[in-house]
Structures are given as C-alpha cells and as structure tokens.
Amino acid sequence: MSRMTQFTDENLTAFLDGEATDDLAYQIERALEVDAVLKTRLEDLSLPVDELKKAMQQVRDQAPDLPSVLTEDATVSNRRSGNWAYAGSLAASVLISLIIGGLFARTYLAPDEARGWKSYVAAYQSLYVGQTLDTIELTPEQIQKNLDNLSVEMGIDLAKMTSGSELIFKRAQLLGFKGKPLVQLAYLSPEGQPVALCIIRTDKGDTEAIGMDELEGMAAASWRKDGYAYLFIGGQDEAVIREGAARLKALL
C-alpha cells in the first residue's frame, strides 16, 4: 500500500505551512523520497514544493543568522527533519510565509499570457474524458445555429471549423476570461481523445509559426492571427495536436 495513505490533507497543509510537528515533518520528508504520488498530492494543494525548497535554501544561505529560540532537543530534531522543521521558531515561520507568498504570486498570478487564459483553458480541458463528448449528438441544423451565434459574438466565421479535418466536431460553447468572450470548439480525435480549439481576442501581433507546449500534462499548440489568439490542446500525442492545429489554422 502506498505510504501516501498515512497522511491527510490537513497533515500535508500543515507541512507546507511549516506548522507540522517535528515527527510529522520528518515522516513526510522521508515519504517524499520514495512516493511520487505523495509529491503529486502536495502539488495539487497549489504549492510548488520543489521551488519552495530551493527558494528557502537560497534565502537561508543569504540571510544573516537568526537568534536561537530553540531548545537543545528541538535543535537536534530539526536538523534531522531538514528544511521543513521550523516549529517553535517565530522568525522562521515568518520566513516561510514570505517565501510561500512570493512564490504563489510569481507562479500563479503572473500576468503574462502563458499563465493567463491558457492556463485556465488547460485546467478545464484536463477534466475531459472521451465519455464527456461521446454522448453529444447535435443535428447539422443545431451545429449551424450554434456556430452562427458564436461567430457573431466573436466577430469571426466559425462555421467552417467543422470541416477539412479528421477531427470529429462535437460542440461549441461560449466561455469568458476577464471580461473577454472565449470560445471553445470541442472535438474528438480519430483515436477518441477529447481535444479543443479555444479562441480569444488579443491585441498582440501575429505569430509566424505554431508554437508547441505542454500544459497540464497535455500537448498544446498556440498561435495568433488577425487579432485573435488560438490554443489547440488535448491528450499527450504531440503529432496529433501539431497536425490538427495546422489544419485548423489553414481554415481560418
């Protein structure tokens, strides 16, 4: 049985906040060395564990020595539990809070495009499974009406986005990001993998080529053209996404 079952979310949150007991922090540190699933659980709690460790070490290396407020027994225990065991030290607790706050702001609140609408689209797409779209059966008339309405909303002709590709079109829906309309066109790949083309207006210039990336563990292709930004994403087959993006871009 995986060692991850020994720890609750409350245990892991306390560990990340620097509020775990010495014994609990030591157990989690040891488990992280052999349990990849546990590390994933920590990442799911929205804290960049590896970056946090590196940043903490850098700050500790550069900072002046702090006054000792630990007992001899606590000092020995803290050495054994590594970077995380700071219980009992108010100054170290403040240091952890500052580092976590700085990393959170840099990692999750960065204003650049890659951590803006694309990250939200990727998180949404990561919830899709084949069955999500399997049961959707729209008539040609329903599809046409759907795309006509969205074309007016976006100011771009979307009706042609259902043809000229091996992708199986399933539906289109209007979403939004920071007050801007965002359209998602959902498809199934020939292998039955859910993929999506998402479109949002942008004031950035055109890109000369399609850029490939990995978002939320999925292959992703993006480009900008004529005032719109595009993201085609889904699955892990980079070739499928690259080819699909090229075909969809040609239709625009």
Image: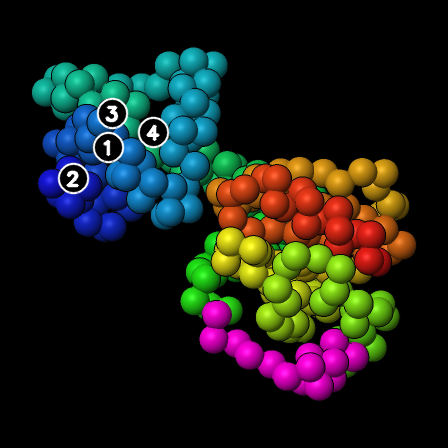
Residue 35: assigned label: 1
Measure the C-alpha gap from mark 1 to mark 4.
27 Å
Indicate left or right for 126 with 185 as reference: left
Q: Residues within 10 Å of mark 1 (few under 14, many from 20)?
A: some
Amino acid type, residue under disc 2 in the picture: Ser
Q: Quadrant of the C terminus?
A: bottom right
Q: Is residue 137 visible?
A: yes
Quarter of the figure with residue 3: top left
Q: Confirm or deny contact between disc 4 and disc 3 (CB under 8 A).
A: no
Q: Residues within 10 Å of mark 3 (few under 14, many from 20)?
A: few
Residue at left offset 66%, top offset 38%: 212
Q: Residues within 10 Å of mark 2 (few under 14, many from 20)?
A: few
Query: Which numbered disc, 4 or 3, marks the residue that appears first in the sequence?
Result: 3
Q: Confirm or deny contact between disc 3 and disc 1 (CB under 8 A).
A: yes
- Is residue 176 magenta-colored? no
Measure the C-alpha gap from mark 4 to mark 2.
32 Å
Measure the C-alpha gap from mark 3 to mark 1.
6 Å
Kind of element beneath mark 2: loop
Magenta stretch: dominant secondary structure: helix
Residue 245, horizontal then vertical, whole percent: 71, 49
Query: Which is nearer the eye, 2 or 195?
Result: 195
Q: Residues within 10 Å of mark 4 (few under 14, many from 20)?
A: some
- Tag 3 residue: 33
**How many numbered marks are there?**
4
Query: Which numbered disc, 4 or 2, marks the residue that appears first in the sequence?
Result: 2
- Tag 4 residue: 92
- Is residue 136 magenta-colored? yes
Query: Which is nearer the eye, 50 or 198?
Result: 198
Residue 2: assigned label: 2
Query: Which is nearer the eye, 55 or 113?
Result: 113
